[in-house]
Image: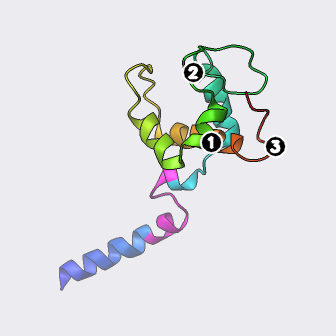
């Protein structure tokens, strides 16, 4: 009987935090495409075209516009979690991966940027 009382007390104690999203901080912060663009310009632009105003990058890698057309959110998340050997080991957080994925996804929508 005491075990059930303890479990109930814990459940009631944690309920307000769960309701506020504090039990899972990643769930509390939605993906931010603007932050994703900032990260992409800093870490990805040396190799990839990441924005319409970018003039040059490596010739043998796809632009973010091309990636946006060909990859799903799941593909991007998977890839950024465990990048291809040619990619630097960025050690991105889940939030950063979500932000970059949201930014790439925004490029696939009409008005998401001039294609390159």
- Nearer the observer, disc 3 or disc 2? 3
Quadrant of the snapshot with the C terminus: top right
Q: Which mark is residue 43?
A: 2
Q: Which residues are magenta?
A: 15-26
Label 1 environment density (alpha carbons within 10 Å; few <14, some 14–19, many ≥20): few
> Of label 2 and label 1, which has the lower sequence position?
2
Q: What's the CA distance linking mark 2 and mark 1?
A: 21 Å
Q: Magenta segment: does it hold 68?
A: no
Please say if the residues under marks 1 and 3 sit with CB atoms less than 8 Å apart. Answer: no
Mark 3, residues whose alpha carbon is within 10 Å: few (<14), some, or many (≥20)? few
What residue do we see at 58% from left, 36% from top? 67
Q: Earlier in the sequence, mark 1 or mark 3?
A: 1
Q: Depth check: 96 or 106 in front?
A: 106
Q: Which mark is residue 111?
A: 3
Instruction: Indicate which disc, 3 or 2, sits on the residue closer to the N terminus.
Output: 2
Q: CA distance from mark 3 to mark 2?
A: 24 Å
* Element type where label 3 sits in the image: loop
Is disc 1 placed on a helix, strand or loop?
helix
Q: How many marks?
A: 3
Q: Nearer the viewer, mark 2 or mark 1?
A: 1
**Res. 102 mark:** none
Say which residue label 1 marks.
Answer: 69
Residue 26 in percent (x, y) is at 50, 50
Residue 6 figure quarter: bottom left
């Amino acid at each position: 009987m005491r075990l059930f009382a303890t479990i109930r007390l814990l459940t009631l104690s944690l309920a307000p935090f769960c309701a506020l999203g504090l039990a899972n901080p990643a769930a509390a912060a939605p993906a931010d495409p603007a932050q994703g663009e900032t990260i992409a310009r800093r870490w990805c632009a040396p190799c990839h075209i990441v924005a319409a105003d970018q003039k040059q990058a490596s010739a043998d890698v796809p632009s973010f516009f091309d990636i946006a057309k060909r990859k799903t959110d799941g593909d991007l998340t998977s890839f950024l979690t465990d990048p291809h050997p040619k990619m630097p080991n960025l050690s991105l957080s889940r939030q950063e991966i979500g932000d970059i994925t949201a930014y790439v996804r925004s490029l696939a929508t009409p008005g998401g940027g001039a294609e390159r």
